[in-house]
């Protein structure tokens, strides 16, 4: 270290120099800080988010009798407020924290039951700084036989109805875009999604499935998976656009781009878990490469055509609300649109960055109008596939016996009927078919 010549400096200047040096040394020894701790309760898990001043090293482990989760974080101090949890919370009862050694911190999460925990770090974005995320999933218990009859009854009740998955974008730690008045995209799109679900359930031949029913985040691929698990016939993702130009306005409707479809096809063919799933009515895991590729391609083509038709009908009805940002259906590689056998569309309802449209998005009456316009488009599409009032006239002109390698989408294409009409007339709730099965072909 360079020696300081005391004679060259005045006493006051020396005081300032030593004060600055001391501050720097203290600053160098100061640990990272936890500035916030937020919690989000989803139906299947609880998410804890630690807001940090910089990235950290951490360890995570569980203890039993009683059930606890222990999080050790290196070189950090706790400067946040501990959240409180209600008796209704399914996972967490209490969070405690205390220093561990001179520089580390231990956080203990008292649990109501055993959990499977996952942790990961997130880099800063437009809304938040560094974050450490903990996802806590309750371990599934056995012996819940009482819920099975209810579930079966619900499935039977929906067999003769179109299942529409309604997905409100963003949620929880991800607020989406923000308007000038602080309006958050995640809030307004959830309000629209709930109104749309109510209107769908009022239709005699439709049933809504809300992918996100509260203020929590669901991964993009998980949203697609949840729709498939619900045996959805249609997937609608609802968003609110934003742009640096405050004059940008109007609605847009998107379907999957060809590039997005190609990348998803490659993923399905490469992933053994995907291949074991049913796509277009068949499993791909026992098919040789070329055949699996052809079957998946046929399923995607049929889905793409249906997606474009539905998107066109919805866009046509959104025009009645006012401005349209894009007059034609747009194509993009959005993850939530990549299901190979569920027609999927994404709707940008308006520009939340536009002051006038932000005000409309906040208005419950306008939210209801948006939901009604979307529903009109969906009804228009379904009416082209099947007329509920003409069921007796929609009898099959011919029967078809399923052969090895057949898929519903391929059969629909061959006989020039829609996949949805084919499923409807045969009371099929999904795309599963078996060799030797006889199905009816609508006229």
Image (cartoon, helix red, strand yellow):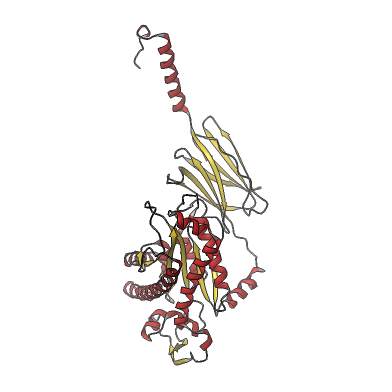
Residue 269 located left or right of residue 155: left
| Most foreground residue, 281 or 333 | 333
Rendering coords of residue 418 (x, y %): 42, 81
Residue 181 shown left or right of residue 93 in the figure: left
Report x, y in % for residue 261: 35, 67
Q: Nearer the viewer, residue 395 or 381?
A: 381
The image shows residue 88 at horizontal and vertical percentages of: 66, 54
Query: How many labels were placed on the picture?
Result: 0
Q: Is residue 244 above or below residue 434?
A: above
Viewer can see residue 341: no
Residue depicted at 50% across the width and 53% down the height:
184
User: Which residue is outermost to the top?
Assistant: 7
Q: Quadrant of the N terminus?
A: top left
Res 26 seen here: yes
When asked about the image quadrant of residue 152, the answer is bottom right
Q: Residue at x 61, y 71 (%)?
A: 151
* Percent position of residue 94, x then y: 64, 45
Residue 114 vs residue 410: left or right?
right
| Vertical arrangement, residue 397 with respect to residue 333, above or below | below
**Residue displayed at 38% across by 57% down:** 248
Quadrant holding the C terminus: bottom left
User: In the image, what residue occupies the spot 42% across and 74% down?
Assistant: 313
Residue farthest to the bottom?
397
Q: Is residue 219 above or below residue 24?
A: below
Q: Quadrant of residue 264?
A: bottom left
* Residue nearer the viewer, 20 or 264: 20
């Amino acid at each position: 270290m360079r020696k300081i010549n005391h004679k060259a400096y005045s006493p006051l200047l020396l005081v300032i120099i030593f004060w600055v040096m001391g501050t720097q040394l203290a600053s160098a020894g100061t640990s990272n800080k936890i500035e916030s701790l937020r919690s989000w309760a989803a139906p299947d898990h609880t998410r804890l988010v630690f807001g940090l001043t910089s990235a950290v090293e951490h360890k995570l482990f569980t203890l039993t009798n009683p059930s606890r989760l222990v999080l050790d974080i290196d070189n950090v101090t706790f400067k946040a407020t501990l959240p409180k949890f209600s008796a209704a919370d399914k996972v967490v009862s209490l969070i405690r924290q205390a220093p561990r050694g001179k520089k580390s911190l231990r956080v203990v999460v008292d649990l109501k039951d055993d959990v499977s925990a996952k942790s990961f770090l997130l880099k800063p974005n437009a809304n938040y700084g560094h974050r450490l995320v903990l996802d806590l999933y309750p371990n599934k218990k056995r012996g819940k036989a009482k819920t099975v009859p209810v579930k079966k009854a619900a499935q039977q009740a929906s067999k003769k109805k179109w299942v529409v998955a309604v997905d409100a974008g963003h949620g929880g730690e991800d607020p989406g875009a923000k308007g000038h008045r602080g309006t958050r995209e995640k809030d307004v799109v959830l309000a629209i999604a709930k109104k749309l679900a109510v209107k769908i359930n009022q239709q005699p031949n439709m049933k809504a499935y809300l992918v996100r029913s509260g203020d929590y985040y669901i991964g993009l691929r998980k949203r697609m998976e949840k729709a498939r698990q619900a045996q959805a016939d249609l997937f609608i993702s609802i968003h609110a656009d934003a742009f640096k130009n405050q004059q940008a306005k109007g609605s847009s409707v998107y379907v999957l781009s060809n590039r997005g479809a190609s990348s998803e096809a490659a993923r399905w063919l490469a992933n053994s878990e995907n291949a074991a799933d049913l796509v277009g009515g068949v499993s791909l895991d026992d098919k040789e490469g070329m055949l699996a590729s052809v079957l998946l391609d046929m399923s995607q083509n049929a889905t793409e055509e249906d997606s474009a038709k539905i998107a066109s009908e919805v866009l046509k009805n959104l025009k009645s609300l006012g401005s349209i940002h894009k007059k034609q259906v747009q194509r993009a590689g959005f993850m939530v649109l990549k299901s190979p056998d569920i027609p999927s569309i994404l709707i940008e309802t308006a520009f939340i960055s536009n002051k006038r449209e932000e005000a409309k998005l906040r208005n419950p009456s306008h939210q209801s109008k948006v939901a009604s316009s979307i529903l009109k488009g969906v009804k228009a599409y379904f009416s082209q596939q099947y007329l509920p009032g003409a069921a007796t006239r929609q009898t099959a002109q011919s029967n078809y016996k399923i052969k090895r390698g057949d898929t519903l989408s391929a059969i629909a294409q061959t006989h020039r009927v829609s996949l949805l009409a084919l499923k409807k007339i045969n009371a099929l709730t999904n795309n599963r078919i078996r060799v030797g099965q006889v199905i009816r072909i609508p006229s």
